[in-house]
Image (cartoon, helix red, strand yellow):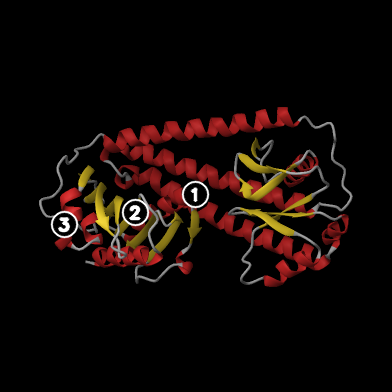
Amino acid sequence: MSKKKFTPCSVYNTEMTEYWLNLTASEGFLLEKDGYKNTYANFTESEKQKVFHRIWPKQSLKKHKWILELREEYGWEKVSTSFDFEIYRAFDDSSLRIDSDESHEKFIKKSACRRILLQIIQLLFSIIIFCLTLFIAPVLAIAENGGLFFAILVLILLLIDCIKCIKNIIMLKRISKRKENRFIDNSINFKRKTTVHQFFNMLSLVLLVISGLILSFAKFDTAVSESPPENKHDLPFATVIDFTEEKDSYALRNSILNSNENWETLVSPVNYEWNESATIKTDAGTETDCTVIIDYHETLHPLLAKYIAKMYILGAKTSDFEFKGYGDCPEFGFDYETMYYSSLEFTAYVFQDEGRIIHYQIRTDEKVSEDFNEKCAEIIADKFRK
């Protein structure tokens, strides 16, 4: 039987989180594979047992395979992972000897310091962007009336970077002070801790929703094109009909335009928000309902396009989608490209070519083949180049 539990503290509070996971295991609930989320964790009911958990900074396992082998030798198995950390567990007291392993401790400190350094560099970059935004917010706005709100959004992202940087530094200090026989107060009231922690999580969520509503209002307070262009082939991006042969006319006959917006800004004369659904045929000859959701911008400078691309990627990283960087994706020859996806039912791409940027999502009602997704990516890339 599975059970969800709200987390009593941030995962960056490593000692408290580890102790909570140990205590939950002793009560008969084991953390599921990839079951740890930002605000809750999934557990599987099991026998009451003594389990040990460790939270370590995430690192590239392709470059450091020896660290995996070392942890396995000590009896540790990876249970869950995120963008900043990994959770391991062991079932034997002897596994705790890894805390005294000098090579492992040195690697952990070096890995954590490298992550914090990158975080600080990103923070400095965000500060520069925010300062620029204060001066040219009306120009950078996605909508003409949204300059102030765009600056607010950048400020929120800046604050998130600051908080994340501080959390990583705290995490490093806690890990460096970890000892094999450390003492944890058994009188900790996890119910009270959970309530306090989740209150601030909910408050952050509410503020994020309010900011989104404000930004949405600013964006849609513009002229909206109610009808689609007469010839979809003239659009600067692929639509549903590009994913199937026109001769079978499935997309042409069944296409339903949900929304189509086209507006102008001072530095982005062409902006589209496109949402369209249709019944199409896959390579296997089967029919499936396909929806494309597109955000397309033509800016006057590549730096603006790169910044918009970063905004989309940050949004993707905060979601539950499995994320892949540009190094793990097919090369399409653009200045900036990346892909993130959750399954064969949903694929999304972000492409940048000079001053143009496109955020392209494909959703199907049924799972499709990897070949179909790759074909769609090629079609999107080819249309985007023109």
**Label 3 vs label 1: CA separation?**
51 Å
Counting other residues with Cα less than 10 Å from the Cα at mark 1, is it few (<14), some (14-19), or many (20 or more)? some
Seen from the viewer's position, the closer of residues 385 and 171 is 385
Please, what secondary structure does the residue beneath circle 3 have?
loop
Counting other residues with Cα less than 10 Å from the Cα at mark 2, is it few (<14), some (14-19), or many (20 or more)? many
Residue 248, how many percent across, how many down?
A: 17, 60
- Which residue is tagged 3? 249
Residue 305, how many percent across, how many down?
A: 34, 57
The numbered disc on residue 127 is 1
Residue depicted at 20% across the width and 54% down the height: 251
Residue 125, how many percent across, how many down?
A: 49, 55
Seen from the viewer's position, the closer of residues 200 and 368 is 368
- Residue type at mark 2 is Ile
Q: Is residue 38 left or right of residue 267?
A: right
Residue 257, how many percent across, how many down?
A: 21, 44
Residue depicted at 61% across the width and 71% down the height: 62
Please, what secondary structure does the residue beneath circle 2 have?
strand
Q: Is residue 263 visible?
A: no
- Which residue is tagged 2? 362
The numbered disc on residue 234 is none
* Eye-nearest disc, 3 or 1: 3
Residue depicted at 78% across the width and 38% down the height: 27
Seen from the viewer's position, the closer of residues 274 and 93 is 93
- Residue type at mark 1 is Ile
Q: Quadrant of the N terminus?
A: top right
